[in-house]
Amino acid sequence: MYESNENFIKGMPEHRSESAAKEDMARLIAKNMSMNSNSSFDNEYYQPSAAPRTATQTKKKTASSGTKKKSTSSKKVGTKKKAKKKSKMPIVLFSTFVVIMICGGVVFYLLGMNSYKGTFLDNTYINSVDVSGKSQGDAYKLLKENSVIPESVTFLKPDGSRFYIDMASIGYNDNTKELVKKYYSQQDHYSWFSAKFKTTTYTFDTKFTYDKKKLESELKRKMLEAQTAKEPQDAYITEDGTKGFTIVAEKYGEKVDESRLDSLNEFVERELDDFKFEIDLSNADCYQKPKITAEMLEDTCEKLNNLYNIEINLDFTYTTETLYGDRVMDWIIFNGEDVTDGYYVDKDKCMEYVDEVAAKYDTYGIDRKFKSTNHGTITVKAGQGCYGWWIDKEKTRDMLVELIEEGTDADIEPIYYVNPDSYFEYACNEDWRTEDTDYSNTYIEVDLYAQHLWYYKNGKVMMESDIVSGYPNESRNTPEGVYKLWYKERGKTLVGESDGHSYASYVEYWNYISTIGVGLHDASWQNGVFGGDRYKSSTWGSHGCINMPFEKAQYVYENIELGTPVFMYWVQ
């Protein structure tokens, strides 16, 4: 594709100046350089400098034109053949580039490997902790920071306070440092570059050891020697002014039972072996225990609170009287400052309450308004009568005291007095009891002045009879009052003594209405004569009973119910 400089020079006209020849030489060199770089130049750059043409030159050119054309053709063929040869310059340049790249790569690799000297490769994890680029020491510190094993063990006391024991002080040693060294040695630092594109993970279970003797020594120092121990406190019950009683729970304090030190040590060692580094010592069973716990006081406290809330209802048929806890608490006397020492009920204060109730509801011994047959409404004095309600105060009080000491609610009836000699009970028909009265329109009426008796049932006279009452002297007179038919007996001999004389009288129908010997009965010795002034005779007047005709006494015995009130009065 190019002509040699020698051939070119040979073809130059001899007559060209030296300067023109040099210029052409420069152009030839430029052409060759252009052809080597596959560049093209205009033909004008390769043509010799023009010279003054002469006739001789023209002729030569003409004469040789054929030759020149052939020569030109020959040149073109020669140029194509030389184009098949490749220049060595690109190979040299490429080789140089490769060498440079290899040298650069080696330098880069060596520099990179050197940068990881003494550290873990990229993307290295130990127990999920990233230790990439960390030295063994730094990796160990990082693992310790993220370790489940702290620098010290925390101990929680039962009172909520805490103390600490450094792991180093008990000879702590674990396998972390050893394993960090092992994992580091396992890494191929020659493969530092490929490590950037993959993850290396190491996992291990932490194992540690400690000196049990040192641990026990530290525990003893912390819990026995270097502390002001708090004594355990017993639970107790305190009174809350308006709400009742509450339990103040026991406190264990922090005083260790020295006889339980072995139990303490064993407990702590078990906890550490289970990787527990916050240890609740309330579960250690090593402290001195309170003698009285809240659980032991629950029944007592409940019983005391029942006193605050107690309601004891006394049933009086038409109404009830309720004893409430606020009053009961005023009767409670504790055996000591501590309510758990027990208590008792002030019986005097309880009796004051019973007295109030009796005064309100007792009807025994009171005068009563009564609508008589012949005198209209009169007042019948209580006299020596036995009718009415009479609370046995002592027995009712004792019943209340017992209920209060048990601390239980109750619905009860008062206990009514019973005569110990006759077993007569001072109580009446509950159906007749109202706020205003204690009898109904069924009753026996005895007009002592008129010497006449009536029996009313539901407001109607069912039977009436003349009578003979007691002889009107001090020992034989029939006392007025409100009585009750409470006992009957058939075929009874009445015995007694009055005015210095004893007597024994047989009766067929004995209807007892009092507790002083007065009754309604037949009297055959009256010879069928009753009423009028016969009672005024010491011969015919009775010893205090109401003498009746046989059939009338029989009627009472057979038809009038026990409990029926008997109104006897002296009204002119």
Image: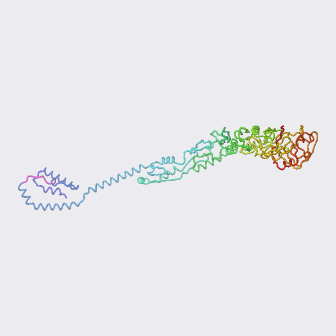
Q: Nearer the viewer, residue 45 or 223?
A: 223
Q: Nearer the viewer, residue 10 or 160?
A: 160
Percent coordinates x, y for residue 297 in the rendering = 69, 44
Percent coordinates x, y for residue 139 in the rendering = 48, 48
Q: Nearer the viewer, residue 363 or 333?
A: 363
- Tally of numbered tags: 0
The magenta region covers 45-53
In this rendering, would 85 be left or right of 479?
Answer: left
**Residue 515 can be seen in this image:** no
In this rendering, would 220 be left or right of 567?
Answer: left
**Residue 260 can be seen in this image:** yes
In this rendering, would 500 be left or right of 371?
Answer: right
Identify the main secondary structure in magenta. loop
Figure quadrant of residue 40: bottom left
Q: How is the image coloured?
A: rainbow
Percent coordinates x, y for residue 372 in the rendering = 80, 41
Instruction: Spot the residue most to the right.
Output: 501
In this rendering, would 426 be left or right of 233?
Answer: right
Figure quadrant of residue 449: top right
Q: Quadrant of the N terminus?
A: bottom left
The residue sitting at 82% across, 49% down in the picture is 559
Percent coordinates x, y for residue 299 in the rendering = 69, 45
Q: Quadrant of the C terminus?
A: top right
Whether 179 is among the magenta residues is no
